[in-house]
Amino acid sequence: MNTYRAFHLILFILFLSIFSCKEPGCTDINAINYNSEANKEDNSCIYNTNLNINFRLVNGNTILNKYDTIFNDNYSFRLINLKFYLSDINLISDNNDIYLKDIHLFNIDDQQTHSLSFEVEEGKYNGLNFGLGVNSEQNITTPAQYELEHPLGLSHNTFWAMEPASYIFVIVEGKMDTLQQNNFYNLTYHLAHDDLLKYIEFDQSKVVSIDENNEFNIDINLSRIFENVDFSDNLPHQRTASPLAQLLMNNFASCFEIQ
């Protein structure tokens, strides 16, 4: 009889140990904080989800496409080519920046380069930052060191091989009419060398969730790019950037607006 009671007592204790001592935590194996020891779901699961960064060319409030013309009191400019590099793209958080991408080349002719997609952890973020141009470590490399289609590869024609060698941070090409008489001439600005690298930071809070369409939308308002530019000045290729190159790069950096 004592053995019978002892057996049931052991079963009762075992039952209590199994069903009363539950470990709370995330029990979904698809979550990045899955806890294999948890046996009680506490709704703490965190997931990775997609975040898109979209770039759009505009002229004021109007979408700007290739061959469109920017009309100004002092000039008319028809856009034919635009390329620019972004380096060290980061997502800003309270704890630390989340490194997203080392280098990206925007090309007006390649729609795929007008948007970037990343997988990031759900949560609240405070904005974005990146370099406009190529960082100094990247700029001592050459296209031969990369695959042909890599952003720094040979196929993009964005490298000055002559001394001093450099990637071209920004390429702006088009037709300019400063007389407003439909008398257009070729205008080309190629901006390069380390001292032209600009840093852009956007402070805009965003809660990234698996149930939402997570996007940062950045407009590039090209109506500002030629502010205070003397079109009679030449843009020399030299080791240090000319005042004109600095002005153009500062103007172009000011064109970036987060929506």
Image (cartoon, rainbow, N blue to C red):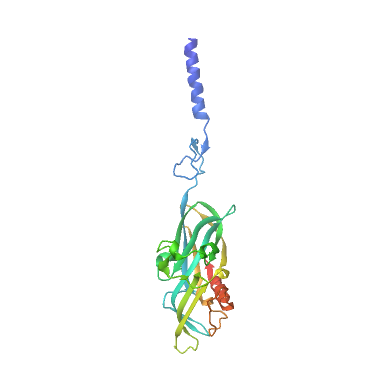
In the figure, 8 relative to 95: above or below? above
In the figure, 103 relative to 178: above or below? above
In the figure, 117 relative to 45: above or below? below
Can you tell which quarter of the image residue 245 is in? Answer: bottom right
**Is 2 or 155 nearer to us in this picture?**
155
Q: Position of residue 172 (x, y in %)?
A: 48, 75
Q: What is the number of callouts on the image?
A: 0
In the figure, 92 relative to 238: above or below? above
**Is 88 or 206 nearer to us in this picture?**
88
Q: Position of residue 85 (x, y in %)?
A: 49, 67
| Residue ranking furthest to the front | 163
**Is 168 or 214 nearer to us in this picture?**
168
Q: Position of residue 2 (x, y in %)?
A: 50, 10
> Residue at the location (53% across, 58% down)?
90
Q: Position of residue 55 (x, y in %)?
A: 47, 66
Q: Is residue 212 visible?
A: no
Q: Is residue 15 visible?
A: yes
> Residue at the location (49% across, 29% down)?
19
